Amino acid sequence: MKTLPIVVLISGSGSNLQSIINSIANKTLNAKICAVITNKADAYGLERAKQANIPTEILDHRQYPSREDFDAQLTKIIERYQAELVVLAGFMRILSDGFVAHFYGRMINIHPSLLPKYRGLHTHQRALESGDKVHGLSIHYVSAELDGGPIILQKTVPILADDTEKSLAQRVLVEEHIAYPKVIQWIAQGRLQLIDHKIIMTDNA
Ligand code: NHR
Ligand code: GAR
């Protein structure tokens, strides 16, 4: 079984990063995290990476004159690690069209809503305000259209009458931590193909 080299991009707590680290440790995921990259020097996920002896890179977007300059530097760093898959895990910077085109088919994101509902930010609050009865997560290939790329997997969770943004976010996160390593393992197994912007999934041999 081949080991899939990946880089994980984070901006915050990194609980999804942790679930990937744990899945590799317990051998349900055949991947190697070559590096954890962040745009936030204070991201708690950096501590998680260090605990697991994973190299870290901090790229402060405020030090670049434009998104394109930031993305050019990000590309350089990613290529240095020779990863085959770029995993966005709570990464909060919109990526330029050129960057996304360069990594198309090799970059995935986990988004806390049932796409195409609630692209962008504050998804839990928006689902609550709309009076939705279900919410969830989507894992998708990243395309130039924000949160609009081909969807690989979705998982729903119920919205309960007494939910707050926090309680709902937590319920979604529990499912994120199960779903994301699973999808990365599908990719490691070579079971996902992107053909004509559509996802083809083959059975486990
Ligand atoms: N880039 C592209 N081109 N396409 C996608 O689908 C992307 C992307 C970059 C990140 C994650 C996404 C999410 O899952 C993602 C998908 C950040 C913002 C945002 O508005 C929106 C969506 C996502 C991530 N970011 C602000 C910005 O100006 C900054 C917000 C902040 O720093 O708090 O980049 O939700
Ligand atoms: C997760 O819920 C993820 O889906 C979401 O941020 C959280 C990150 O948590 N992503 C976005 O909102 C992307 N814009 P984590 O840092 O603990 O993995």
Image (spheres, rainbow, N blue to C red):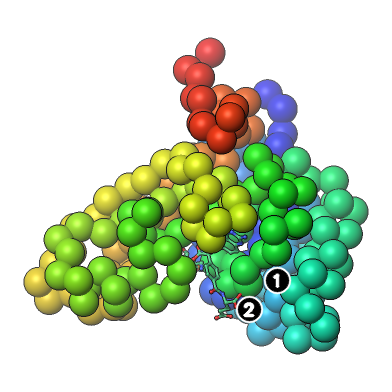
At x 36% / y 64%, what residue is drawn? 118
Residue assigned mark 1:
38
Q: Are marks 2 and 1 in contact (CB under 8 Å)?
A: yes
100 and 18: which one is in front? 100
At x 20% / y 57%, what residue is drawn? 134
Q: Position of residue 133 (x, y in %)?
A: 15, 61
Residue assigned mark 2:
43
Residue 137 to residue 48: above or below: above
* Amino acid beneath label 1: Thr
122 and 24: which one is in front? 122
* Amino acid beneath label 2: Ala
Q: Residues within 10 Å of mark 2 (few under 14, many from 20)?
A: some
Which quadrant holds the N terminus? Answer: top right
Mark before the other along the chain sequence, 2 or 1: 1
Q: Residue furthest top?
A: 205
- In the image: residue 200, left or right of residue 118: right
At x 90% / y 53%, what residue is drawn? 80
46 and 114: which one is in front? 114
Dot 2: element? loop
How far apart are labels 2 and 1 at the CA level? 7 Å
Q: Position of residue 61 (x, y in %)?
A: 75, 80
Q: Position of residue 11 (x, y in %)?
A: 61, 73
Q: Is mark 1 within 8 Å of ligand 2?
A: no
Q: Quadrant of residue 190?
A: top right
Q: Is mark 2 within 8 Å of ligand 2?
A: yes
